[in-house]
Image (cartoon, rainbow, N blue to C red):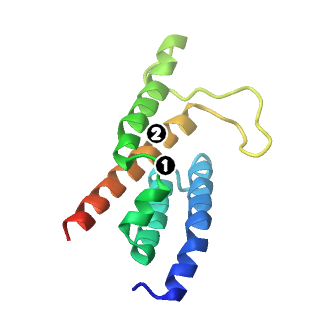
Amino acid sequence: MKTIIFKTASAYLLPLLLLFSIFILLRGHYLPGGGFVGGLMASIAFVIHSFANGIDKTKNIMTFHPGFLMPVGLLLALVSGTLPLFFGDTFMTGLWMENALPVIGKVGSALFFDTGVYLVVIGVTLTIIFTISEGL
């Protein structure tokens, strides 16, 4: 599947799918979507790129091993869950900013939790797929 059309299309699809995955991540507050679906979408972008260009070129795009994203995402999700404890609320209670940001809307602890899930899903999915691909 390493045709010139697929290679060219994957060069354009990678940034578009990554941008769409961030849109899905941010959309998850008010509508269906969020960290899990956005993370899968981002992983699919890298998988398509690796199918078209080879696993080595895809790994060169990423500046670090995808397994590094797992503990970072877990830490971010844990911090967003425990942050309400410092304000006298229970674990995983949603905290929201008073004023909305122009593009994103009202930012709350749910966004940071979803971002942590987003990073964990990308890390787990790409680590599994890269490990399987190296074994073939």
Q: For the residue labelled by badge 1, is the local secondary structure a helix, a strand or a loop?
A: helix
State left or right for residue 26 relative to residue 126: right
* Residue 105 higher or lower than 75, as above or below: below
The percent position of residue 135, horizontal first and vertical second, equals: 19, 65
The reply to whether residue 43 is visible in this rendering is: yes
What element does badge 2 sit on? Answer: helix
Label 1 sits on residue: 35
Which comes sooner in the sequence, label 2 or label 1?
1
Marking on residue 61: none
- Which residue: 62% across, 59% down? 19
Give the camera-side residue of 124 and 62.
62
Q: Is residue 84 above or below residue 125?
A: above
At label 2, which amino acid type do we have? Gly
Q: Amino acid at mark 1?
A: Gly
Mark 1 is surrounded, within 10 Å at the Cα level, by few (under 14), some (14 to 19) or many (20 or more) other residues, namely many
Residue 5 position by quadrant: bottom right
